[in-house]
Image (cartoon, rainbow, N blue to C red):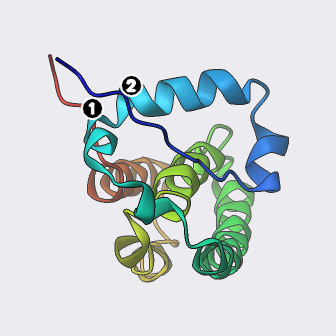
Amino acid sequence: MYKKKKYRILIPDTTIDIVSDVEDMVTQLLDYYVYIQDLEDADLSDSEKLNADLDQISAEYNELCQDYGKLMQEYGVLNFQGSELFTRNTITGLKLGLLMNKLERAKSIWGEQLNLNYDSAKEIIQHFADRYLMKKEDS
């Protein structure tokens, strides 16, 4: 028998501006990140820490956006997927407190690779996704 749990998910305004259907996004989040079922409410309750984490990640994201822009301008990259990665990481890492330490290293990994060509950039994106995003377990 399953025990029903409630989760208070804090989503930053910047994410709400990006995502058109927040309810669907949260539903997908709960379906996609199966490990959330093991979280306790205490993990989601420290709003001061979450806000500080948001400021830190937002600053890193802004720097990454500038780097993305330089790469797109130099190599004509049209679909760079940076916003999608940021959105997913913001929700999981920032607001659920699961990925903060890993995300702190993301900028240094990207910074070393920005002069590569488009194919290499796509590999870096995949590396970032594989390393920093929790993947849905295959059923």
Mark 2 packing: few (<14 Cα in 10 Å), some, or many (20+)? Answer: few
Picture residue at 37% right of the left edge, 62% below the top: 98
| Whether label 2 touches label 1, CB < 8 Å | yes
What percent of the width, then of the height, locates residue 115?
51, 72
Q: Is residue 36 above or below residue 90?
A: above
| Residue 103 horizontal side relative to residue 23, left or right | left
Q: Is residue 136 above or below residue 84?
A: above
Q: Nearer the viewer, residue 35 or 40?
A: 40
Disc 1 target residue: 136
Q: Look at the numbered disc 2 and give the secondary structure of its residue.
A: helix
Q: Which mark is residue 31?
A: 2
Picture residue at 68% right of the left edge, 51% below the top: 11
Q: Which mark is residue 97?
A: none
What percent of the width, then of the height, locates residue 1?
16, 17
The amino acid at mark 1 is Lys
Q: Is residue 25 above or below residue 70?
A: above
Picture residue at 52% right of the left edge, 71% below the top: 114
Where residue 75 sits, quadrant-wise, is: bottom right
The amino acid at mark 2 is Asp
